[in-house]
């Protein structure tokens, strides 16, 4: 399983008991940790600046960017509207 710094940060946040349970699950499986790079940050910022991902979903933009930079398949959360995802994959970021 591939996990980014961003995912680990999210797993450790919130209710302390729930966070502990999430982190325990991650400790029980082999992980490949992906770091947040400048390129990923640039892509995430572009997704937000172009209105593809709303600013309130900046963490989701970062997940998409990290996956893109590292060639990782991304499981898309259901809370991201389908139209936004279609735009994301149709729009050039450059």
Image (tube, rainbow, N blue to C red):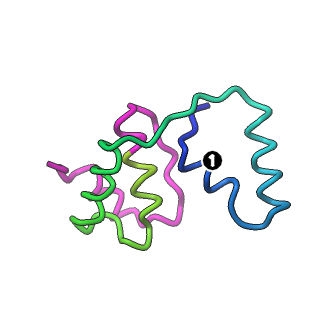
Q: In the image, what residue occupies the spot 29% across and 55% down?
A: 88
Residue 83 in the magenta stretch? The answer is yes
> Which residue reaches farthest right?
17
- Magenta stretch, residue numbers: 66-94
Position of the N terminus, as image quadrant, is top right
As displayed, is residue 5 above or below residue 44? above
x and y percentages locating residue 22 in the rendered image: 76, 50
Q: Which one is nearer the viewer's eye here, 3 or 81? A: 3
Q: Indicate left or right for 6 with 49 as reference.
A: right
How many numbered marks does the figure carry?
1
> Which residue reaches farthest front?
38
Residue to which mark 1 is pinned? 8
Q: In the image, what residue occupies the spot 70% across and 26% down?
A: 30
Q: Which one is nearer the viewer's eye here, 91 or 21? A: 21
As displayed, is residue 48 above or below residue 38? below
Residue 79 in the magenta stretch? The answer is yes
Q: In the image, what residue occupies the spot 39% across and 57% down?
A: 61
Q: Indicate left or right for 15 with 44 as reference.
A: right
Q: Indicate left or right for 22 with 44 as reference.
A: right
x and y percentages locating residue 43 in the rendered image: 28, 50
Q: Indicate left or right for 1 with 73 as reference.
A: right
Q: Residues within 10 Å of mark 1 (few under 14, many from 20)?
A: some
x and y percentages locating residue 49 in the rendered image: 24, 66
- Determine which quarter of the picture holds residue 15: bottom right
Q: Which one is nearer the viewer's eye here, 40 or 63? A: 40
């Amino acid at each position: 399983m591939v996990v980014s710094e961003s995912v680990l940060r999210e797993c450790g946040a919130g209710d302390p008991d729930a966070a502990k349970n999430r982190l325990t699950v991650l400790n029980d499986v082999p992980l490949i940790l992906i770091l947040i790079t400048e390129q990923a940050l640039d892509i995430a910022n572009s997704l937000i600046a172009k209105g593809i991902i709303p600013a309130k979903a900046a963490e989701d933009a970062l997940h998409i960017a990290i996956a893109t930079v590292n060639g990782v398949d991304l499981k898309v959360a259901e809370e991201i509207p389908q139209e936004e995802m279609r735009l994301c994959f149709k729009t050039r970021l450059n």
